[in-house]
Amino acid sequence: MKRAFIIALGLMVAQPSFADSNLPAAYWANRQLPDERQETAAQALMDQIRCLVCQGQSIADSDAELAGDMRDLVRRRIAAGESPNAIRSWLIARYGSWISYRPTTEPAALPLWLVPLALLVAGGLLIVRRVKVRGRK
């Protein structure tokens, strides 16, 4: 029993060291494209794509290995002549609309747009009503 506990404890402590890959970073992960126009387009797109690991950062800002792979993918596709909109559409098709920081127009996102507006209208009506009640006193 004691031996099993020590083994389990050892595996839990060693687990984070197994999380990192020993592979080198993707070629274009941390390099800029030679064509300045293409690099500008790549940077603009990478700022709009959410890191799948960090979730609160774009792939341009993230140090996660997967974000580096995605930066490499974006730069390779732009260097090959693919448009940023086509790359963004491909990423959304593969990972879902959540991956993009740009707001979506899907019907499922409609409550995200309407609820804040409804709350503003309700708050405005409440204020008008309160002002009218205080004016009558």
Image (cartoon, grey):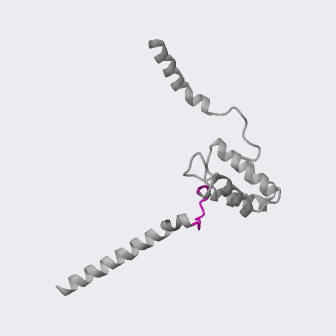
Relative side of 44 to 134, left or right = right
Q: Is residue 90 above or below residue 19?
A: below
Tell which of 6 and 76 is nearer to you: 6
What span is colored magenta in the figure? Answer: 98-106
- Residue at image point 83% right, 56% down: 80
Q: Is residue 114 above or below residue 59?
A: below
Percent of width and height locating residue 114: 47, 71
Residue 104 lies in the magenta-colored region: yes
- Residue at image point 25% right, 84% down: 132
Hey, which quadrant is residue 93 in on the image?
bottom right
Hey, which quadrant is residue 16 in on the image?
top right
Percent of width and height locating residue 18: 61, 29
Furthest-front residue in this view: 107
Residue 68 lies in the magenta-colored region: no
Check the picture and name the quadrant holding the N terminus: top left
- Residue at image point 57% right, 52% down: 57
Check the picture and name the quadrant holding the C terminus: bottom left
- Residue at image point 65% right, 47% down: 67
Percent of width and height locating residue 2: 44, 13
